[in-house]
Image: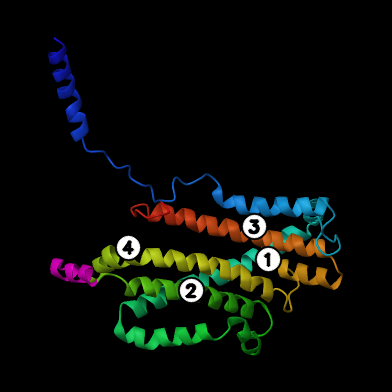
Amino acid sequence: MSAVTTTEAAVTIAPAKDTPQVRRRRRLSPGRRLPAARLAGPVLLLALWAAASAAGQLDPAAIPAPWTVVKTGAHLWTDGTLPTDILTSLQRAATGFAIGLVAGVLLALASGLSRTGEALIDGTVNLNRAIPTLGLIPLFILWLGIGETFKVAIIAIVVYIPIYLNTHAALSGIDHRFVELAEVQGLSRFAFVRQIVVPGALPGFFVGLRLGVTGSWLGLVVLEQINATSGLGYMMFQAQNYGQSDVILVGLVVYGVFGLVSDSAVRLVERRVLSWRRTLSS
């Protein structure tokens, strides 16, 4: 009886030794996206700023405390100065951005879909890219005057260059096998652009769009200090003359909020439009 029991136990245990061990797969992706994760950095910076101000580590005349900046911003808002300047800046940035967006996309399509267009456009745009855009300000003032037109033109140039470069690079990077497949299927030019060119160029376009949005705000803060009578840059320039560092910080905070919100909006649209892609970030 004991021998039979031992034999059955051996038969029962033996297969367990032969069972292969399943190796645990190592997770290499970044993991699940955290809600509002992009706000963690700005919130941490704000907390450090507040802590340093409360501890007396920062000179209030140079870097006022966050609560002082908030109080100044509320005062500027109630007396009507800040809303007027914000509206003026938004109009300038939006006009220049719209012109730069249209120009960048059209030039990229003309250059990316035609060898003749590439020969005429690509070298010229890269030459323009090599010239500091803000260095064109004196020349544009001579050409367009010192009013609003030259400000919008400079913003448009700042915007169209990254949109063109990234969209053109995406067009050039489309796999040629898709082009051959479209030719075999007998697609028309319009169908080829809609089904092959546009989906292939969208990832690069959105990268350029994000850079263009940021560039429009960077150019605006400089341009509004040149013969302007309103706008956030003008407000900051006037505050510099009177040593009002809190007003300058109000303008910088508004610029930063606009930049963060506009970039987040582009990211949101990008995720919606390119939801078919399976990428590391998604």
Is 107 left or right of 254, judged from the image as shown? left
The span shown in magenta is 176-186
Is 87 left or right of 270, judged from the image as shown? right
Q: Residue 251: horizontal and vertical position, in percent?
A: 73, 63
Of the numbered discs 2 and 1, the one sitting upstream in the chain is: 1
Secondary element at tag 3: helix
Q: Residue type at mark 1?
A: Thr
Q: Nearer the viewer, residue 121 or 79?
A: 121
Q: CA distance from mark 3 to mark 1?
A: 16 Å
Q: Residue furthest top?
A: 1
Q: Residue type at mark 4?
A: Pro
Label 3 near label 4: C-beta < 8 Å? no
Q: Residue type at mark 3?
A: Val
* Mark seen at residue 88: 1
How many residues crowd around disc 2 within 10 Å: few (fewer than 14), some, or many (20 or more)? many
* Mark seen at residue 162: 2
Q: Residue type at mark 2?
A: Pro
- Which residue lies under the disc numbered 3? 257
Q: CA distance from mark 4 to mark 3?
A: 31 Å
Is 197 left or right of 51, judged from the image as shown? left
Q: Nearer the viewer, residue 19 or 282?
A: 19
Q: Residue 225: horizontal and vertical position, in percent?
A: 73, 75
Residue 201 lies in quadrant: bottom left
